[in-house]
Image: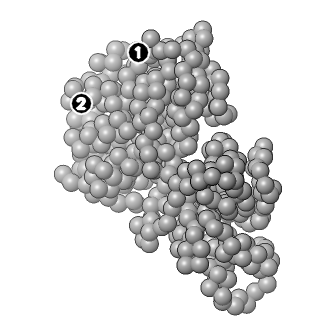
Amino acid sequence: MIPDPVSNVGCPFCGLVCDDLTIGGAGGRLTVQANGCRIAAAAFERVPPPGWSQPRIAGRPVRLEAAAAAAARLLADAHQPLIAGLATDVAGARAAGRLADRCGGVLDHMNSAASIRNVLALQDGGWVTTTLSEIRNRADLLIVAGTDIVSRFPRFFERCVENRETLFGGERQCEVVFLGRGLPEGITLPGPAPKLLGCEIPRLHEAFGVLRALLAGRTLQSDSAAGLPLSTWRELVDRMRAARYGVIAWAAADFDFPHAELTVQALCELVKDLNRQTRFSGLALGGSDGDLTADSVHLWQTGFGVRTSLGRGKPDYDPYLYSALRLLQNGEADVLVWISSFNETRTPPSSTVPTVVLGRGGMVFEREPAVFIPVGTPGVDHAGHLFRTDRVVALPLRQVRESSLPSVAEAIAAIEAAL
């Protein structure tokens, strides 16, 4: 029996994976009783529609074994299956990799268009990054580049910035500077009020370049940069130099413009330059829909992250060729297996290829998939593990309600058994 309420629950619905929630289940409906946020409340307290737990073949209700057998037949006949979405936990990602290896499939995550911006910058020149614990205990300056943080990670400031006490004794204050469109609503920080340097996100690369030039003591033949006076950037450089432990945080998902990986690269080079004069780190914010988990698991198993093909008997990584959207748009994939166990709105992209969906119950499709197998959500219907946004730890997820739904790993095992 699962106790009611359940304490110290890990939340799988954003990359922070906050592990201090209290979840109640009175009357069969989950409620977030303590330490939740708007994302957690909406996801845990969601009431699925009638019939949400029934597998289907072409819209016809069937048993799990029949659905798994139908999916197996599609995979057995495929020349280049695409296993995408990959919104699952560690066990589900391992099973997806195993299935791709057996079928000669391509692996790609639903969020890879954003995460690949970080990967390309990391592959090209490396980076210096930190952890949430280091920010909580050491940071005295946090520069937030191009994001408000709270829309994707609502409890970030509560858990990493608002604390006064640290592991090392004494008190600290963390000054926060936003580079972007506006300040987030509803955050109250101890110490100085957050400062906004209004800058269009596609011009951040210009800002980072100017900051690097000023840091190096170079003369610029301009009175402004990225829409702000040069004096504003000089003041920011002086504050960066004075920081004992500074951090620049960004979310690649908010860098949604052409060649945004070059902006990430400029940011990473700025952090390296700062470390010649003080101590500075970056923080790449991600982890939603299990994207960092899938990437980490496949990195262990193949030596590469997502956008890797196993169709040639060995891992073949190509961030352009093995984009799921490109494969579908060009008709290069002949079966799509779409995995989405956290969010019922993340349905497969529109395509004409036969589609197998392992998804959270209640999904509404533009076109009914060939096979639909409802699966449990890690951290709700079954236990699991999920990597946090800083990648340093895979946190455990607890089961908080009784469920007969298979996990993604169990659903894939049923398909493999039919193969």
Categorize mark 2 by other alpha carbons within 10 Å: few (<14), some (14-19), many (20+): some
Which residue is depicted at the point 63% across and 73% down?
Answer: 208
Amino acid type indicated by mark 2: Glu
* Residue at image mark 2: 416
Please tell me how many numbered marks the rendered image carries.
2
Depth check: 51 or 1 in front?
Answer: 1
Q: Decide if residue 256 is on the left or right side of residue 231.
A: left
Which residue is depicted at the point 71% across and 88% down?
Answer: 220
Q: Decide if residue 158 is on the left or right side of residue 47.
A: right
Secondary structure state at the residue bearing disc 2? helix
Considering the image in quadrants, where does the N terminus appear? top left
- Residue 404: numbered disc: 1
Q: Is residue 368 above or below residue 133?
A: above
Q: Is residue 311 above or below residue 386?
A: below
Where does the image place residue 387, in percent across and percent down from the top left? 45, 44
Where does the image place residue 99, in percent across and percent down from the top left? 27, 38
Q: Is residue 184 above or below residue 35?
A: below
Where does the image place residue 43, in percent across and percent down from the top left? 59, 29
Considering the image in quadrants, where does the C terminus appear? top left
Residue 175 image-quadrant placement: bottom right
Q: Tell me which label, 2 or 1, sits earlier in the chain.
A: 1
Residue 79 image-quadrant placement: top left
